[in-house]
Amino acid sequence: MFTGIIEGIGRIAGKRTAGGGMVFDLEAGFELTDPEEGESIAVNGVCLTAYSIRGRRFSADVSPETLSRTKLGSLGPGDPVNLERALKLSDRLGGHLVSGHVDCMASVAGRKETGKYTIFSFSIPREQERYIIEKGSITIDGVSLTVNSCAAGIFAVSIIPHTLQVTTLGDLKVGSKVNIEVDLIGKYVEKLLSPRTESDAQDKGEDLNQAFLARHGFL
């Protein structure tokens, strides 16, 4: 689990195919204190398992599923990436709960400078737009951000100068692809409220009465 608060920018040192997927060699731009083989590190918002940790360098396997659902496959040696190590229970939760499981990719639809701030708008697949709400949380390339506004197939965020400086978001241009993780709480709520079977669907349309309670063992 992560928070979306980026610890620093790293770079891809190399990549190679392996077992249908790929192996990425990465170098962090900060010290990996107390490293543990097999720990989780979010790379541009994608939770990866780090191994062969040597100083600031580590390797990670990237599965075919991850390559198809994220922009990692399009990155190459020298490209910068946002890095965040997994949350400790004693840490401050400065952003929001981030799983590191990317839901989709979005593309930059617009970039506008407004005073000290930069307003980005993103186009997103329609099947994901229902999870995005105004003033809700969203993760873009691993960065926890607040949604300014949203409409059909598009949403906007306002980014402060500090975030542009310490993450890769400052490099984004119109047309750039980004990894998106929507707020996981909304997905769980939707799942719990959705009928699992035809009989459940029928039950949801019924009134709460004695017959309903008896049929479900409450009487």
Image (cartoon, rainbow, N blue to C red):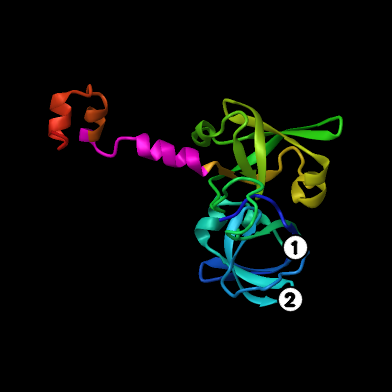
Residue 186 included in the magenta stretch of the image: yes
> Circle 1 — which element?
strand
> Which of the 4 image quarters holds residue 213?
top left
Tell me which amino acid carries mark 2. Gly
> Circle 2 — which element?
loop
Tell me which amino acid carries mark 1. Arg
Asked if residue 75 lies left or right of residue 62, the reply is right
Q: Which residue is mark 2?
A: 55
Residue 113: horizontal and vertical position, in percent?
83, 32
Residue 87: horizontal and vertical position, in percent?
60, 58
Residue drawn where x is 17% and y is 28% of the image: 212
Q: Earlier in the sequence, mark 2 or mark 1?
A: 1
Asked if residue 15 lies left or right of residue 30, the reply is left
Q: Quadrant of the N terminus?
A: bottom right
Q: Which residue is mark 1?
A: 11
Q: Quadrant of the C terminus?
A: top left
- Kindly check if marks 2 and 1 are in contact, taking CB atoms under 8 A apart as contact: no
Residue 189, above or below 30: above
- Magenta range: 184-199
Label 1 packing within 10 angstroms: few (<14), some (14-19), many (20+): many
* Of the pair 174 and 32, the residue shown nearer to us: 32
